[in-house]
Amino acid sequence: MNHKQGGAESASEDRSQSPADLVHRAAEGAHHTIDRLEEQTAPAAEKLRDQLDTTGEMLHARADQMRQLGREWRDGVRSSVREHPLTTIAAALALGVLLARLSR
């Protein structure tokens, strides 16, 4: 009989709580859940941020390498044209004729 009374008392307590108390308890539960989720996801978010930083640095380094390669190629072509101007003109003419025939 004591068990039934205990159950009746808790049911009576639930009914005696004001709506503000229920909202407050629900809000506390939601805050607790959000805090737990944040604790669980924070390490993954930090790892992702580190990976993005590393990837960004790698892309910048690769872009610098490509710019340097482009400069070297351009300088090599200029040097070749200066050293062999007639050969360069003949090669350009041959390439032009080939492209013209292919485009027909």
Image (cartoon, helix red, strand yellow):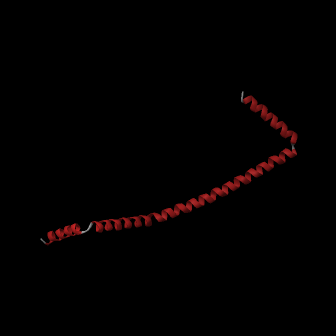
Q: Nearer the viewer, residue 20 or 77?
A: 20
Q: Position of residue 40 (x, y in %)?
A: 43, 65
Q: Is residue 29 left or right of residue 48?
A: left
In the displayed orientation, state which residue is furthest to the top. 104
In the displayed orientation, state which residue is furthest to the bottom. 2
Q: Position of residue 39 (x, y in %)?
A: 44, 67
Q: Position of residue 9 (x, y in %)?
A: 18, 70
Q: Position of residue 74 (x, y in %)?
A: 78, 48
Q: Residue at x 56, y 60 (%)?
A: 51
Q: Residue at x 76, y 52 (%)?
A: 71
Count all numbered tags in the image, as a single digit: 0
Q: Is residue 22 left or right of residue 71?
A: left
Q: Is residue 45 left or right of residue 90?
A: left
Q: Residue at x 72, y 30 (%)?
A: 102
Query: If the image is split into quadrants, where does the N terminus sit?
Result: bottom left
Please, is residue 64 above or below residue 4 in the view? Answer: above
Query: If the image is split into quadrants, where does the C terminus sit?
Result: top right
For residue 12, which quarter of the picture?
Answer: bottom left
In the displayed orientation, state which residue is furthest to the left. 1
For residue 18, which quarter of the picture?
Answer: bottom left
Q: Residue at x 21, y 66 (%)?
A: 15
Q: Is residue 85 left or right of residue 33?
A: right
